[in-house]
């Protein structure tokens, strides 16, 4: 039944708790005891899978992982304490000094910093390429051990033809890893498009309530097994039971929330096309590339020079200034704030992001109220 169920039905599945609890119980325990020496020995030797210690295994976390594996059509999943823990643990599990990584341009800023500040000093070569280069240059991945992808990318939201890119990767033996946080499993299933490993900042749409920091990785049993064996226990960035419980709660409404985000985003894209002061909108929609079936609520708008961006931001009433996204609330992030961030590893500077760009995360408020707030602020920000 689960193999044939639609996504919303899979995510609404109740727990198998013998007490009849609808959500899985929160198993708030650091360790698990054994009834006999034989049972303990069998677990330590790997003959059984009984939980032993929450840093590596917990029933509530396992319930979340199983839902995510189903949602992404993967064989297995492993949860982490943050999206960056998921990303860094994945990359460290599969890379060694001397390896080469091909990364999408406009990658998530902290992923860029991890690549530059942690992996490059270890002797791992990093190169950055546009979505078009990944698609159109069949030999781009020759000699590359890992291709790190986002579709769409961060900030400018450029989508890519994943079946085409993964076809190139398979020919050259490159492992493909993609951050699917923007689309969520509702609008894109990268494993079905040929990607090897999917990562999520589960703090975003998976949670949906801006009250959880978490990450998750989905892939084959072999790939997830490698992460479980190496970086999950030894780096220790485990997902806690209560956060797993909150994420399961978020998954129950993921499909409905994503459709609402999409409806608001579609309205904004249509109306922004004729809006004075707007130079360009970055927001890929359904069927822009193969396998992308919808538009999430995260987009960017580039203003022209007639808009005073600080004044525009200060005039907003419903939108809030903030760095995250994917929750119930609407947020705005001006690129010039990111461009001014201290430190030499600034991805917005690296990839020449326009200072006139602002990122919008459209939440679950009434769409007309959001549009009215946006346009009144834009009129006050006009130079």
Image (tube, helix red, strand yellow):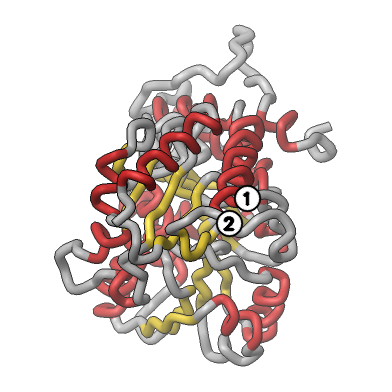
Side of 134 where 280 appears, left or right: left
Mark 2 residue crowding within 10 angstroms, few (<14) / some (14–19) / many (20+): few
Q: Along the horizontal axis of the image, is 268 left or right of 335? A: right
Query: Residue 33 or 27: which is nearer the viewer?
Result: 27
Tell me the SS state at disc 2: loop
Which residue position is annotated with label 2?
273
What residue is at 61 percent from the left and 92 percent from the top?
139
Residue at figure coordinates x 47%, y 56% from the top left: 276
Quadrant holding the N terminus: top right
Name the one closer to the observer, 306 or 2.
Answer: 306
Q: Name above or below for residue 233 compared with residue 291.
A: above
Q: Secondary structure at mark 1?
A: helix
User: Where's residue 188, x and y in %?
Assistant: 67, 53
Q: Is residue 45 visible?
A: no
Determine contact: label 1, label 2, CB under 8 Å.
Answer: yes
Q: Quadrant of residue 21?
A: top right
Residue occupied by mark 1: 270
Name the residue rendered at 32%, 60% in the picture. 335
What residue appears at the point 45 percent right and 74 percent down from the top-left corner? 105
- Picture coordinates of residue 94 (x, y %)? 46, 69
């Amino acid at each position: 039944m689960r193999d044939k169920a639609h996504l919303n039905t899979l995510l609404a599945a109740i727990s198998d708790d013998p007490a009849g609890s609808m959500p899985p119980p929160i198993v708030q325990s650091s360790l698990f005891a054994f009834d006999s020496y034989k049972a303990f020995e069998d677990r330590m030797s790997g003959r059984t899978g009984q939980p032993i210690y929450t840093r590596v295994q917990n029933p509530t976390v396992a319930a979340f992982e199983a839902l995510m594996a189903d949602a992404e059509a993967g064989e297995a999943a492993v949860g982490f304490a943050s999206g960056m823990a998921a990303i860094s643990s994945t990359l460290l599990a599969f890379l060694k000094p001397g390896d080469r990584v091909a990364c999408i341009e406009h990658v998530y800023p902290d992923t860029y910093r991890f690549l530059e500040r942690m992996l490059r000093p270890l002797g791992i070569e990093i190169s950055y390429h546009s979505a078009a280069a990944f698609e159109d240059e069949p030999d781009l991945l020759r000699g590359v051990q890992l291709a790190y992808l986002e579709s769409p990318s961060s900030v400018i939201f450029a989508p890519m033809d994943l079946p085409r890119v993964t076809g190139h990767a398979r020919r050259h033996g490159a492992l493909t890893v993609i951050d699917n946080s923007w689309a969520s499993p509702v609008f894109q299933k990268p494993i079905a498009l040929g990607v090897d490993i999917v990562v999520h900042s589960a703090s975003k749409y998976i949670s949906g309530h801006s009250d959880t920091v978490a990450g998750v990785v989905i892939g084959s049993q072999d790939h997830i097994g490698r992460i479980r064996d190496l970086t999950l226990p030894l780096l220790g960035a485990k997902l806690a039971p209560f956060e797993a419980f909150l994420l399961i709660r978020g998954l129950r409404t993921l499909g409905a929330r994503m459709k609402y985000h999409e409806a608001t985003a579609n309205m904004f894209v249509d109306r922004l096309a004729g809006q004075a002061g707007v130079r360009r909108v970055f927001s890929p929609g359904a069927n822009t590339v193969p396998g992308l079936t919808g538009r999430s609520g995260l987009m960017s708008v580039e203003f022209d020079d007639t808009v005073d961006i600080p004044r525009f931001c200060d005039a907003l009433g419903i939108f809030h200034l903030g760095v995250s996204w994917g929750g119930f609330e609407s947020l705005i992030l001006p690129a010039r704030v990111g461009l001014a961030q201290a430190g030499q590893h600034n991805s917005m500077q690296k990839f020449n992001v326009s200072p006139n760009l602002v990122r919008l995360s459209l939440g679950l408020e009434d769409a007309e109220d959001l549009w009215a707030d946006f346009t009144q602020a834009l009129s006050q920000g006009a130079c």
